[in-house]
Amino acid sequence: MDLDYWWLLLIPCIFGLGWMAARFDVKHLLSESANLPRSYFRGLNFLLNEQPDKAIDAFIEVVKLDPETTELHFALGNLFRRRGETERAIRVHQNLLKRADLPVAERDHALYELGQDFLKAGLLDRAEEAFRQLQAGLYEVDAQRSLLAIFEIEKDWARAIKTAEHLEQKGVQSYAKEISQFHCELAQEALLRKQADQARSELERALKANPANVRATILLGDVEQAGGNALAAIACWRRVEHQNPQYLTLIAERLMQSYTSIKQEVEGAEVLADYIEKYPVADLLDVAFKYVSALHGGEAAHVLARTQMQKSPNISGMIRLLDVQIAVADEPRRTELELMRNLVFQRTKNLPRYTCHNCGFRARLFYWQCPGCSGWETYAPRRVEPLTGGS
């Protein structure tokens, strides 16, 4: 009971000490604020009002009054870089690095910012040199990430792989998808040099890094097809369905060409028809319609297009249905149908078909790496149709 009583006496004492500490902090803050030039607060106000040009002018005034303020130098440098004035940003950060009294942490910060300046200016060799000096400390991981970006820009895939593996060892995040794609890039380079064994070796490494990498499987099929082994190529491409059926649109034409090369077009058309039944998308229908029409005639192609339009209406299916109608129509109805068909086709052929789900960049071609944000595997291989919103 006595113990509870003493605890009750301690409570107001604790509150009193807290109140005194708060008053001390406030006085300290007000004292520091009083020593800051008015230009500093004007600069902050301009930043809050999204007026970077005026903020820069205000901060320049502060730096003139107090050249030793490193924080303002960093703020100025970043503002210059964001505004595209990379030369001025470089000078700011180089001047900081010239100071003999700069602490190690701030020197690393200045070196990292200088590397970012060079990177923004497109001076990749100088940016790489700056980032390589940050082998330890607070900015090591960020510097390694920037080096990875540089190697991707330079298409130096071997060094990109080493850097990504180093980042993984640091426990930053998994780079399995990126490493796998880098091996695919090396495989494509080997294919261009007609080095099939080297390409196959790189693709095996790609699948080891990321077994779900559809691109590696597709390229393995390309290697087999280039070597004249159509059956092995078909076996590779058919594995895509089990990895990710969305990507069947990328191998449909390849499959049919390989089946045709070994005179098994009918079996190939049946495989495509089975895919369309499971995954009704526009690109698959385009390929299947062409081969079904050639193998089995217009009526079979008409049934295929009509069935798919009933399941999943899309612009591609509409064009195929019009093609069938044109083939059997008499004048003047044929001319009217051709006008309709050409109008729809012209309206859609030049529009972007694929959209990056990371940055929204739209493109007519499918990319494994987005040209906008440089993200890997950010495009769905299904076309986005402008009139329906999807396929």
Image: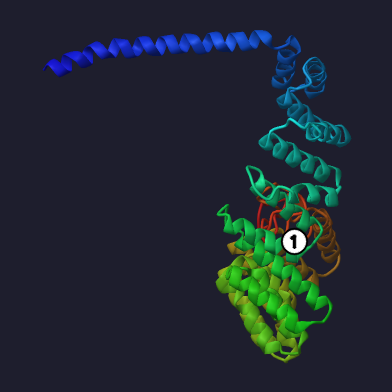
* Residue at image point 69% right, 33% down: 103
Indicate whether 63 appears above or below 239: above
Horizontal and vertical percent position of residue 12: 30, 10
Indicate whether 349 appears above or below 201: above
Horizontal and vertical percent position of residue 3: 16, 18
Q: Residue furthest right?
A: 87
Is residue 206 left or right of 116 when viewed as pictured? Answer: left
Q: Quadrant of residue 234?
A: bottom right
User: Does the rendering let one see residue 49?
Assistant: yes
Q: Residue furthest bottom?
A: 263
Helix, strand or loop status at disc 1: loop
Q: Nearer the viewer, residue 169 or 329?
A: 169
Is residue 214 left or right of 38 when viewed as pictured? Answer: left
Q: Nearer the viewer, residue 177 or 60?
A: 60
The amino acid sitting under disc 1 is: Phe
* Residue at image point 74% right, 80% down: 198
Are there few (<14), some (14-19), or many (20+) residues within 10 Å of tag 1? Answer: some
* Residue at image point 68% right, 10% down: 35
Indicate whether 323 appears above or below 83: below
Is residue 266 left or right of 126 when viewed as pictured? Answer: left
Q: Quadrant of residue 300?
A: bottom right
Horizontal and vertical percent position of residue 381: 68, 62
- Residue labelled with disc 1: 366
* Residue at image point 83% right, 76% down: 192
